[in-house]
Amino acid sequence: MNVLVTGAAGFIGYHLCRYLLARGDQVLGIDNLNDYYDVNLKLARLKELEEGAGCERFRFIKLDVSDKAAMEQLFREGDFQRVVHLAAQAGVRYSLENPDAYISANIVGFMNVLEGCRHHSIEHLVYASSSSVYGANETLPFSERDNVDHPLSLYAATKKSNELMAHTYSSLYRLPTTGLRFFTVYGPWGRPDMALFLFTRNILAGEPIDVFNQGNHRRDFTYVDDIVEGVVRTLDDAAAPDAKWSGSDPDPSTSFAPWRVFNLGHGEPVELMTYIRTIERIVGRKAKINLLPMQPGDVPETAASVKALEAAVHYRPETGVEEGIERFVSWYRQFYGV
């Protein structure tokens, strides 16, 4: 296929592009290369894509999804069959400091993607949502049938907005869309603002690590290869109307339109302190732990029910936390020479 991947220089975008190129797809990647975290890491990911296997089928354009004119030109000149939209302003805590960035990237940018897909007969749009949409929901594991009307951060609110916007376009224009609610993704080439990266870096440097909620968090840590497998399986299986859907008893995860949302997680939440002890064991050093209170916008626990995705596309996560952390630490040591 000819696939457009937004956010191609990002953590998940990089791994997804590698997968698509390895199986023979044509990939056009776009990214604005902003400085939310180290741009050099993003450039290193791009270099891998531009020089690695299948590189002759990869093309990159530096482009901001919030730039309407540039996005219109991109879709007009491209010949995409399917689109994976991963570009977004990430981070729950950063949304408290710079809310404008989330409206620009996550709302305006997503609108531009939807318009491009609408006007150019895209076969299927798959986009990144987030486990953050579950907000104040305390029923575990989180199910796609759960209410998601109580977000706890602007980031979460923008992701729920994306799901609603996608439904509107699926309903009005019969655009097949699938939203994937990612659960705490980790692995090689990961983001420097994420826990595994921060913990590994500081433990190796002999510096303390900040552990919020007094270490009482539980997270559904999901290895990046499993995430990419779920993305590709849904990309290949375009959303279709649910013949069983009823307006008198509406299923929040499907629709009369070609629209759906899925959880994409591991399905086995891990205590944060267990996660940290695993990092210590693999790194070979003890962490200096700075226990802190819960941060605004955080939730104490996430856990994904992945039954719907398994039933739809036979998704099944394969990488456990210990193996995933070992792979990350190995990459980190090699990449940073420590």
Image (cartoon, rainbow, N blue to C red):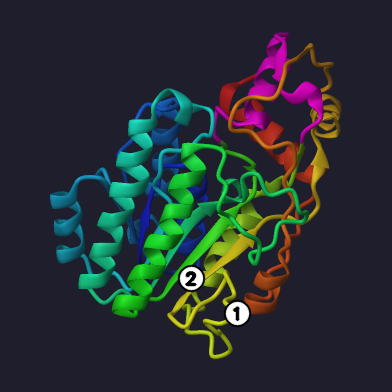
Q: Residue at x 45, y 26 (%)?
A: 37
- What is the span of residues highlighted in magenta in the rendered image? 191-217
Q: Quick check: is 18 in the magenta stretch?
A: no
Q: Residue at x 81, y 52 (%)?
A: 268
Q: Residue at x 74, y 51 (%)?
A: 303
> In front here: 204 or 256?
256
Q: Quick check: is 214 in the magenta stretch?
A: yes
Select label 2 or label 1 by which is in front: 1
| Residue 291 visible, this angle | yes
Could you tell whether 176 is left or right of 327 in the image? left
Image coords of residue 92 (percent x, y): 53, 34
Image quarter of residue 217: top right
Image coords of residue 83 (percent x, y): 37, 65
Mark 1 highlights which residue? 249
The secondary structure type at the circle numbered 2 is helix
> In front here: 115 or 75?
115
Image quarter of residue 209: top right
Rounded to the nearest whole Å, what is the CA distance between mark 2 and mark 1?
Answer: 28 Å
Label of residue 152 in the image: none
Taking 296 as reference, is 72 above or below it? below
The secondary structure type at the circle numbered 1 is loop
Taking 119 as reference, is 165 above or below it? above
User: Which corner quadrant holds the C terminus?
Assistant: top right
User: Which corner quadrant holds the N terminus?
Assistant: bottom left
Q: Amino acid at mark 1?
A: Asp
| Residue 53 visible, this angle | no
Image coords of residue 227 (percent x, y): 61, 56
- Which tag, 2 or 1, sits closer to the chain's start? 2
Q: Amino acid at mark 2?
A: Leu
Mark 2 highlights which residue? 235
Taking 234 as reference, is 192 above or below it? above
